Amino acid sequence: MNNKISAVAKAVTLLLATGSTAAHADLVITEYMESGSQKAVEISNLSGADIDLDASQYILSAYNNGVTGDPTETETLTGTLASGESIVFHNGDAVFTFGTSTKVVNFNGDDALVLTKDGEVVDRVGKYGERVKWSWTDSSGNALSTEDMTLRRGADITQGDTDKSADFPTNVDDWVGFEIYTIDGLGCPGINACTKESGSLVITEYIEGSSDNKAVELSNVGDSPLDLDAAEYKLVLFSNGATEPGNTEVLSGTLAAGESIVFHNSKASDDFKVGTASTVTWFNGDDALVLYKDDVVIDRFGKLGEKLVWTDPSNPDFSSQNKTLRRKNGIKVGETDASAPFPGDDNQWVAFEINTYDGLGCSGEDACPEIPVCENCPALDPIADPDAFNREEYYSDVINGEFETAEAMKDAISAVIASGHKKLSYSEVWTVITKSDEDPADSMNVIELYTGNSIAKNSNAGRGGSWNREHVWAKSHGFPNESQLGYTDAHHLRAADGTVNSIRSNYDFDICSDTGEEVSSAPGNFRDTDKRCFEPRDSVKGDVARMILYMDTRYQGNDSNMPDLVAVDRITTAEEISANEPLHGKLCTMYNWHQQDPVDAADIQRNNAVYTYQGNRNPYIDNPEWVKEIYGVACGDVEPTLEVDFVIEIPEQVFEGDSFAIDASQTAAKEGVELSFRWEQLAGPELSFEESSSVLNLVAPEVDSDTQVQFKLTVSDGSLETSQLVDFTIANIPLTLDVSFSGTTELNEGESTVITASIADEPEGLTYAWKQVSGASAEFSADGLVLNVTAPDVSVDQALVFELSISDGVETVTSAVSINVKNAVETGWTKPKAAGSLGLGLLMLLPLAWRRR
């Protein structure tokens, strides 16, 4: 369900339409509300004709505390105000669901308001230049006061009071007073409460775009909330001209006036994914949709029982296919005859180009207005990509570092998270919090830290009923100035209810639920003013802890305008806070909360969002185990260790084939207790050994190169254990063989020979392989060291080379033997005699021309 501009909102905001200009005196202040923190003023057009507010300069001015001359605040009226309609200005309190928030109504009962047109007074409330005590009242005794009352203009008043310096009220019957907090008349002129039309549900938008870009919007176009559970409201798809119901959505909940429900196709592009995915959007431009209330038709799109792409002969832009269609403004009741021709003679739809989606979520012909994310929230460009974040790279100096103390490790972490840290402005923090604290269930809201409530992002005024920026490490604990880096560090700034934020004050965090009082507006949170401590609700205790530990680690006194922040294991004193000492408690409570409330999705979301815009990360969210390494000793979380003097004797050099021992028998516990031994091989060729012995007796296997071997020795006293790594290298002894060959190595074509290889001091376990490596291809066979070869025909004398490969299973040695084969001269052929150059040339050409066999 999406927020929309309601019918009441349209009635009380500026309606942009053309119209004639009426006399200035017909614009009147018709309602004034001064009710505690709730202030509002209503200005109405009582002329009977539209007023173009831009044709002249209409200004509402506030003159606070009797000031004259320049007004305290002003608001310029713009647009066109239809006859009988009103503009409402209010002070932003959450009770106002319509109208415009403006500072001009931040008045008290003794502040004057003056409405002018081109500098001429057209109406006023209060007396200009006069500061009365508390308020103006009716001296005749009527119950009338500009403080703690709602005042409505009398029914017969059609022109304003143009003498701003006259006594107020001018006439007894000008105003009618109502009880404090009366709000039901805002938005309509007159002394009575505004009447509202009942809720009315209609189909207000239909999108049949490319591919799966399909959506349908239903809106309450009435003036009252609609209880969808009071009857059975359902939207039904009738596909391909069917009259039997197809895919159906049953509606539930309460739909406020002006709000909408949107259903979209689950495979649609992201821009169309407003509201809820539903199969009721499986239409193709020729399928009808019917909206029912208790099985009675209250609206439809298309004609039930007809399979047709519906068009309008009088409007070539209209089509139920490849278009976005929006219901015309002013349609308050749906079409109840689902079988009537569609769109009919009075087409109620406005057509837009295919894939137009900017109107989804708000009824009417126009695109949805852009709602500011929050007040004073500047746009921010990302400076880091959390999707590309690599923990091992980002924290490599810590992960790969060796630290003798926890403090040294903390210093290394601090250096990592200081790198890339961009200083945000305090306004930019608003923007970051809308990302970091965003409600996963509603992207328009944030989750408040202490209350857990989901509240609109644009409700960030900082007063009660709205949210503000909570410094988890209280800024009075070391960095009271906005220019200081920690003041705007978004890793410890959270959305918080303004009232609860004030209640927390600058107290340290500790357990005080047993001694303090529960915060009534934020159950589960406790404050002890005597102890000066605040305890947040259980589900965010770990979040708070990791933020405090982040600040303690990030700020080590290395930044030019920041002190060394220190988390201490006590409650800081009022004197320390007054002096802005950079201390915050309570360290070991934070340590325990970190363990009790582990890192969750909310922590990760916040860490990634802050990283995106600030450029650094909270290490204790990325590496929760580091909390123990850094703070465990300080908080007494130290596991007992077994102290052992490891004495391990290893040969200086180990060659393959050697038998050797690794002797750890002199290893002993410092307490003198008896130890048991357990060996585990971690690297290298697998060796046979007795794993529970204090001495390893090993035989080095053959290796083809120098090979590293690693064992881990674990010793135990029966309850505790500790380990030591043992490394050594098995050195390779290269395989060398003395090979000789026997047998005839001079052959004629066609002759055979047997070549036998001999190996001096031949070791066992060798294997042999023969291959010919050069010369004309010959027939040969081999058996072990014996090679049988038959000489091939050759055109010229040449050598046949055979290679013998000898392997011991690890290494291989090769040796070659050459067999010379002579070419046989053909019978009848004689060598020609020399015959000068001609004879020589013939002799050279003869081998080319002579073909053998």
Image (cartoon, rainbow, N blue to C red):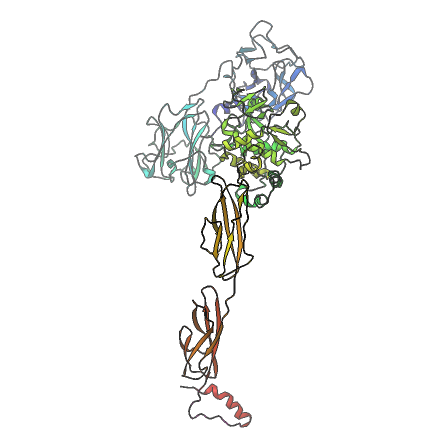
- Image height check: is 596 above or below 87? below
653, 527: nearer the viewer? 653
Image height of 231 relative to 624, above or below: above
- Magenta span of residues: 824-834
Quarter occupied by the N terminus: top left
Q: How many marks?
A: 0
* Image position of 254 (left or right of 727): left
Is the stretch drawn in magenta largely helix, strand or loop? loop
**Image location of residue 122, percent across then percent down:** 61, 17
Judge whether 708 appears above or below 646 on screen.
Answer: below
Q: Position of residue 379 (x, y in %)?
A: 59, 35
The single residue placed furthest to the top in the displayed view is: 140
765 is within the stretch colored magenta: no
Say whether residue 779 is visible. yes
| Residue in front for this viewpoint, 69 or 799 | 799
* Image quadrant occupied by the C terminus: bottom left
Residue 567: image location, x then y, percent: 61, 31
State the image quarter where residue 347 is shown.
top left
Residue 830 painted magenta = yes
Q: Nearer the viewer, residue 689 or 792?
A: 689
Residue 340 in the image, given as x and y percentages of width and height = 34, 32
Can residue 373 be spotted in the picture?
no
